[in-house]
Image (cartoon, rainbow, N blue to C red):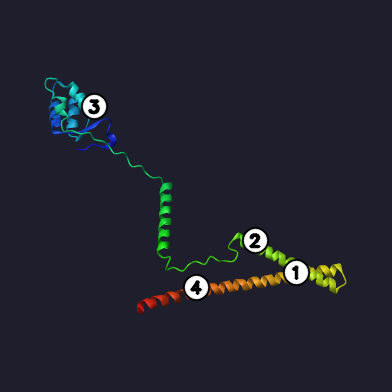
Amino acid sequence: MATDNSNRVGLVISSTDSIRVYLSGASNDATLSDELRQTSSDLLLRSEIPYASLRALWMASDPSTRPDLTRLFSGTHFVFSSPKPREKSEELKARLKKLQDLAERKEYQELVKDIAPKKDVEEPFSSYKDQLGFGLHVVVTMFSGYLLGYAAFRALFNHSPTMNAAGGILGLVGAMLVETLLFIIRSSNADVNKTRKFSQKPRSSFSTSRIKKTQ
């Protein structure tokens, strides 16, 4: 009967026939105390024996009847316990699961990169640089419209400050409307181009597969 690894203390050796014969005799040896005889009986049923307990029995036995240590330990070997596996924390398990999912997703994308349609990344104002450039363009356009309206009304109404300001505001609003119209036109063209690209991809793939079949 094997012992539990968690109960091993100190050096442990395997039981052999010579050791079992000695333990059987020690369990009935009247010269030993009751405690040592009980220890002998307990060790007799075990396949792995603590060296300290066996040596204590041997030291207490009669020198004239006990076997030689070399003969007693002949054929035995040391028994080493394996360390308990280290348990992973819940946080580590979740992180490993996330990394595994990312690796599987990346592997899947690598497999279908030639089949799946590519994502269009060219979106209006997709970057900070585009947003800043568009904002500056709008400001310059509105300022130019204001100056143009101001100059036009100044020439028409004999340098009237009120009419000049009204003309500048009218030019500013007109420039804003023109810029808005141009923005709508650009967005519509981008959507149309995107739709055309999407509709052309299935056709091209279908035609390619059809050519392969005919070959």
Could you tell me residue 135's position as x and y percent?
A: 67, 63
Of labels 3 and 1, earlier in sequence is: 3
Q: Nearer the viewer, mark 2 or mark 3?
A: 2
Q: CA distance from mark 2 to mark 3?
A: 82 Å
Circles 2 and 4, Cβ within 8 Å, touching? The answer is no
Of labels 2 and 3, earlier in sequence is: 3
What residue would you read off at disc 1?
145
Left or right of residue 81: residue 187: right
Of labels 1 and 4, earlier in sequence is: 1
Could you tell me residue 139's position as x and y percent?
A: 71, 64
Q: Residue at x 14, y 24 (%)?
A: 68
What residue would you read off at disc 4?
198
Question: Which quadrant of the view contains residue 190?
Answer: bottom right
* Label 2: element kind: helix
Q: CA distance from mark 2 to mark 4?
A: 30 Å
Amino acid type of the residue tagged 1 in the rendering: Gly
Amino acid type of the residue tagged 4 in the rendering: Phe
Of labels 2 and 4, earlier in sequence is: 2
Q: Nearer the viewer, mark 3 or mark 4?
A: 4
Q: CA distance from mark 1 to mark 4?
A: 39 Å
Circles 3 and 4, Cβ within 8 Å, touching? The answer is no
Give the number of marks: 4
**Quarter occupied by the N terminus:** top left
